[in-house]
Amino acid sequence: MPVNIQLCEDEKRTPAKSTAFDLPSGVKVFKLFTNPPEPAPEQPTNLTATGFTLKLSPGSYDVVMVVISKSDMRPSYVFENCAGNNELAQIPKPPSGHFTLRVI
Amino acid sequence: MVHSTRAVHGIAAVVITLTFVLPSRTGAQKLPPVPKECNDIDEVATGTISAATFADITNEVPCFWVIVPQLRNKIIQSALQTVEKSVSTVQQGSTSGSSGTTSAVSKPSTPLASLASEYGGITSSTSNQTITLQTTLDGIPSALAGHGVVPYCWSPTVTIRGCVSGTKLQFLNRFGLGVTANTSTSSQTATGSASPPQGTTQQASLNSVANSGLSFSGASFKYAILRGKFTLPEKGPDPTPTENARARLDRAFMGPPNHADPASNPPNLQRDVWNEYAAWQSCIEKQFTTQNLYTSDKSERAKREEDYFDRYYLQIVGILFDGDQVDCSNNAKLPVFAGPGRLAGQSPQSELIAATENYMAAASIFEAQLGPMLDAAAGTALSFEYDYNTPTNQPTTSTLKLIGSRSFGSKIVCSKSKSNTDASASAAITRFTGTINLAGNLYNSDPSKVPGAGVFRAFQAGSELDTAFCTTKANWLESFFGNSTVGLTYYYQDQVSPSILKVTPGAPLSGINIVGLAPTTSQVFTKKGPISFVQVKYGLGVGKNVKFPIAFSWSNRTDLITHSLWSAQFGISYDFSSLLGSSSNSGTP
């Protein structure tokens, strides 16, 4: 099942304005426990400045996100937007953040 | 079903020589304030970020990097990627006053570094070949930081010894410098007829003028008074090095595949060390609560933050490099670090160090590249320009100019080449850009010996409208124009003081042939009057480093020649900002 991820300005899930995913390839999904880290093929899909979609087979993944930000002082937040307020990551210091996923 | 976990990974340690910063902090009863790189603790206190985020060292690499041995500048060594540049708000070649230029109207922005060769005068009667070198004051330091030759401060809270800061670079970016030299060697002459002499001056009507030889033509200084609206660029620097560095960092601190199985080992860290790291993370979450840290009194809050930071957060160094156990008791004492660390030489710790160094380098360079992009995306709305002109055989002049620019209309995306449809090879630009100039032109010396002449030579006003075209658009007109800009310019100059040609009495300059010139004449002046100038300019090369402007113009007269004439200007410019390691991104055509 595809998972939609959203970059937000705050914890109230306001869409990001001062931060954006670094297009066109600022999100990469790596398979956990691979050495060196091995990217999951063709992931993510539908990457935009404020969102992307993951469609992953069962397994564990490290989702690495690179953002461009007007202000280095402002954290940004990443939510799974199909599951209410499920916060996946906070990015306190640009340019990168991450979260891990286990797909079962 | 998807489960997410955050802040489960381990910790980065930056230990090159194991000359810890910490011993000096812990050796005294009173520790220094919390490093500014660790100021996220205040975000935790105010509830802006969670304690779990703060306890994931992969999110707090700069903090960790400061509380363990300082990195050296040599780690900041990575390659840069090139990106697009803006087109129509950047002065690509010589300014409008030059005798060899394709620009009737000056643009508000100066490229980070560019070289242009142009031919054709606008208001001057001479049409020289010129070469112009331009740069902003931040050009060299930005290039060095973007290439990793010097460290970049990353952000106001992340400083590296000897680093250049983004704030300073932004300030320096406001200043632009340009130097233009004549390079033509033609032997064209000035021809005309002179009126009766008036002392050592004599009025002449010239039919054509040109100059010869390699000479200094002029210099310009530009200051950006007002920047445009600060917006994120369409795309940032290449994220790949940062992504790979981040993945390596995450892996270096990762926990075991099966937390419940004691035999399951983390991919990098020793299992017992990782267990303590996980316990430390839980401890941070337990102790770093808003209840424990927050108070509206900022001074008191800083004391609390410092106390908790010193007693709990700093334990991570001992956990990672000495195999210490976490002390999460409410009366935990300040940690003490003696020696380089029992585990510091082991391979998991070495990988932590290497992964942290790698990430710091990648992230620093990423931010160093992003800074100029943000500046360029903001663009310049209003600039002041000073031009110092040295027209051949004429008195030097100064031009004080106010330049305004605004981009408007829809965004269009131009591919760099027809064969490349990769999104990374495209640049988004704004369809239209309007530019206006208002200027006063002054003689640098008093021309009072010339009848009707004063220091104030001319009032100048110009406007230009540029339209961008892309080949990617399914439109025959755009396909015809290619990736290019087409500009329409109107320029007006009210010349209130006549132009002056300097001649040596009795020995007229080579190539100047004016009928009726008296042997005692040292200055020849022409009829003054308003100049109207219209130009259509085609600039091939949107989103590229190399541009080929070509223009056709009509004017009712020039500074010396009093009849109408058609002319052509053409040139080539190369913006080598990308070669220097930084470049501007396009927000405007």
Image: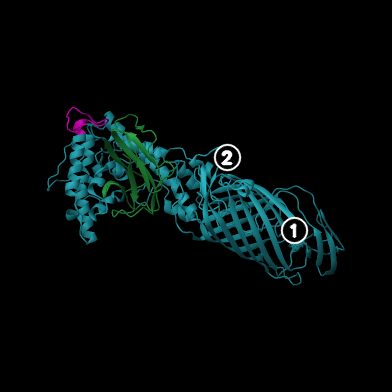
In the rendered view, does B388 fall on the left or right side of B21? right
Q: Position of residue B100 (x, y in %)?
A: 69, 53
Is A1 inside the magenta-drawn segment? no
Identify the residue at image location x=74%, y=55%: B567
Alpha carbons under labels 1 and 2: distance apart: 40 Å
Identify the residue at image location x=27%, y=36%: A103
User: To which chain does the residue with label 1 belong?
Assistant: B
Does B164 appear above or below B262?
Answer: below
Predominant secondary structure in magenta? loop
Is B271 inside the magenta-drawn segment? yes
Identify the residue at image location x=60%, y=63%: B437
Residue sitting nearer the eye, B291 or B125: B291
Label 2 Cα neighbours within 10 Å, binned few <14 / some 14-19 / many ≥20: few
Q: Amino acid at mark 2?
A: Lys
Quadrant location of the N terminus of chain B in the rendered image: top left
- Residue farthest to the right, as pictured: B516
- Residue linked to disc 1: B125
- Residue farthest to the bottom, as pictured: B452
- Residue linked to disc 2: B418
Q: Position of residue A66 (x, y in %)?
A: 38, 43
In the rendered view, does B217 fall on the left or right side of B30? right
Helix, strand or loop status at disc 2: loop
Q: Position of residue B540 (x, y in %)?
A: 63, 47
Its colouring scheme is by chain
Does A76 appear above or below B342?
Answer: below
Residue B284 in view (yes/no): yes
Q: Which residues are magenta?
A: B258-273
Q: Colour of chain A?
A: green
Residue sitting nearer the eye, B37 or B278: B278
Image marks 1 and 2: residues in contact by CB distance under 8 Å: no
> Which chain is depicted cyan?
B
